[in-house]
Image (tube, rainbow, N blue to C red):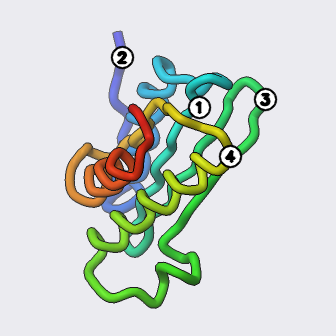
Amino acid sequence: MAYGVKIAKGDARKRAAIKRRHVRIRKKISGTPERPRLVVTRSNRHMVAQVVDDSIGHTLASASSLDVSIRGAEGDKSDKAKQVGALVAERAKAAGVEAVVFDRGGSRYAGRVAALADAAREAGLKF
């Protein structure tokens, strides 16, 4: 039987819940050389996406809203998430990756996370 432990209030509690969900997801999802893992990390301001091969523990491609090409772009956070998705897909294709497994990182598949995933699919990555 699992017992819930109250560890903190406010934001620390939310981060702990996200971490718990991510651990639960990672029990089922693992990146292989044929299908690496597309990891999405979402903060209040930025989005980071990485394509990771878990068998060797290397990042094959990455993109972030902090990249120079995206940082100065116009639009809201969802628009920037779409640009990050397209950029990570482009870099993954250049690294020889055709298909990935999607790791939403404990966040809900909605809003910016879904926008990033949809843009990566449109750019040619297969999930």
Cα–Cα span, label 3 and label 4: 15 Å
Q: Quadrant of residue 31?
A: top right
Are the residues tagged 2 and 3 within 8 Å (C-beta)?
no
Q: Quadrant of residue 11?
A: bottom left
Amino acid bearing label 3: Ile
From the viewer's side, name the closer residue of 27 and 121.
121
Q: Can the viewer see residue 20 in this picture? A: no
Disc nearer the start of the sequence (3/4): 3
Q: Nearer the viewer, mark 2 or mark 1?
A: 1
Amino acid bearing label 2: Ala
Residue 16: image location, x then y, percent: 43, 46
Which circle marks residue 95 in the picture? 4
Element at badge 2?
loop
Q: Nearer the viewer, mark 1 or mark 4?
A: 4
Q: Mark 3 — residue?
A: 56
Element at badge 3?
loop
Amino acid bearing label 4: Ala
From the viewer's side, name the closer residue of 49 and 108.
49
Residue 19: image location, x then y, percent: 46, 42
Disc nearer the start of the sequence (2/3): 2
